[in-house]
Image (tube, rainbow, N blue to C red):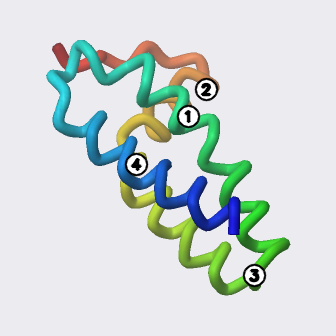
Amino acid sequence: MMLFWACIFWVLASAAVAMLPMRLQYVPGVALLAMAPVLIILAGLTWSWWIAAFALFAFVSMFRNPLRYFLARARGERPEIPR
């Protein structure tokens, strides 16, 4: 039950962060980005693999731009950050 409430909190926190101006989204956004894989893995272990797959799809869809940025940084590129 605790995992369910942690997922609900994560969703509400991500919606609140999305409403912030772009310059204030970085720190809480990275924290949410780091917490998501842990919650997805725990959801897969607790409930089912297909729930984890659905959550992973939603996560990649929602964080596609930050994931592209970190992938580009990992390749040695210097992508431009929006202001």
Element under label 4? helix
Residue at 55 percent of width and 69 percent of height: 55
Circles 1 and 2, Cβ within 8 Å, touching? The answer is yes
Q: Name the residue under label 2.
A: 75
Which of the two discs, 1 and 2, sits closer to the camera? 1
Q: Which of pointers 3 and 1 indicates the residue nearer the eye?
A: 3
Amino acid type of the residue that numbered disc 4 sits on in the rendered structure: Arg
Local packing at callout 3 (Cα closer than 10 Å; few below 14, some 14-19, many 20+) is: few
Answer with mark 2 or mark 3, whichever residue precedes in sequence: 3
Write down the quadrant of residue 7 in the picture.
bottom right
Q: Between residue 73 and residue 55, name the one nearer to us.
A: 55
Marked residue nearer the N-terminal end (4 or 3): 3
* Residue at image mark 3: 47
Mark 2, other Cα within 10 Å: few <14 / some 14–19 / many ≥20? few
C-alpha distance separating marks 1 and 2: 6 Å
Q: Which residue is the extreme one toward the front?
A: 1
Q: In this view, does 39 lie above or below 71?
A: below
Residue pointed to by mark 4: 64
As measured in the structure, the alpha-carbon distance from the residue carrying label 4 to the one carrying label 3 is 25 Å
Label drawn at residue 71:
1
Is 10 situated above or below 8? above
